[in-house]
Image (spheres, rainbow, N blue to C red):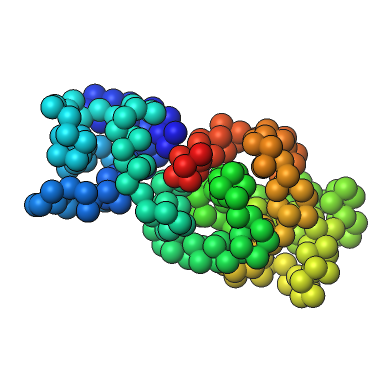
Amino acid sequence: MCITSSVGRGARNDLADVAAIQTLLNLNRSRFPAPRPKLLEPDGRIGPHTLKAIESFEIAVMRLPESDAVIAPGDATVAALLAGLSPGPSKEKLAIVLPLAAGSRIQCYFEPLKAGMIRYGITSPLQMAHFIAQLGHESMSFLYTEELASGTAYEGRKDLGNTRSGDGRRFKGRGLIQLTGRANYTAYSQFTGVDYVADPTLLSTDPTIAVDVSCWFWKDRGLDKLAERDDVKAVTKRINGGYNGLDDRIQNLRRGKAVLGL
């Protein structure tokens, strides 16, 4: 289910849902008869161009006798839009899963994500859906690769390996998955052979590393197995330590499953 509430004329029109439908309509543009509608700006705002595109898709593509320009979660129009997607990963599909992500951020992280998921075996549709859903929440749709808080809350946290003065700030959450604590930075350094303890900011400033550390953490902590069980609560708790943002993670997951045909 790629939307969680209704989109269209007089509908609820949540920002993320509208943006997802706008992107789907753009991806189905080749199915419209000429003259095809103009590309929509996937800004999450419902307006006459989006409403017209919904109507045109339902009448001209789906061959419905009429259209009320309203799309509901899981209805025939959603199924028809999803059926028009090309196979394989794409930036556009990633934009549907994370409809609030800026185009520049999708552009920045798509190739590193594709390469990283192949390298670490995050390749089954179910595991990919869970992985992107979690990264999307942790990074606020690829907006942040470094925790906004100062990190002082982690000071003295021996469970994170923060045994030296200043470790809380120095090893606060970084990467798309927000790796936290001296112990985790040390483990990743040992795995890669690169000393990220000496320069922890690389996990947030280099897009390839921000993705790679997230893939490593996923595999190292057995999140692949939890994802294959389709247990979003267990995946969330292992990453977050609790269930912060669970509903947002679930919404991301639903969109991920939808574009991957699950």
Residue at image point 76% right, 59% down? 171
Q: x%, y% of residue 247?
A: 56, 31
In the image, residue 135 above or below residue 66 = below
Q: Residue 45: in sight, yes or no?
A: yes
Q: Residue 100: in sight, yes or no?
A: no
In the rendered image, the residue lying farthest to the bottom is: 194
For the image, the number of numbered tags is 0
In the image, residue 192 above or below residue 28 = below
Residue at image point 61% right, 63% down? 118
Q: x%, y% of residue 216?
A: 72, 60
Quarter that holds the N terminus: top left
Q: x%, y% of residue 192?
A: 76, 71
Left or right of residue 8, residue 98 in this image: right
Among the 4 quarters of the image, the one containing residue 164: bottom right
From the viewer's side, name the closer residue of 133 and 149: 133
From the viewer's side, name the closer residue of 256 and 203: 256
Left or right of residue 258, residue 134 in this image: right
In the image, residue 159 above or below residue 236 = below
In the rendered image, the residue lying farthest to the left is: 35
Q: x%, y% of residue 19?
A: 34, 43
Residue at image point 31% right, 30% down? 76
Left or right of residue 148, residue 46 in this image: left
Among the 4 quarters of the image, the one containing residue 90: bottom left
Among the 4 quarters of the image, the one containing residue 173: bottom right
Residue at image point 22% right, 53% down? 30
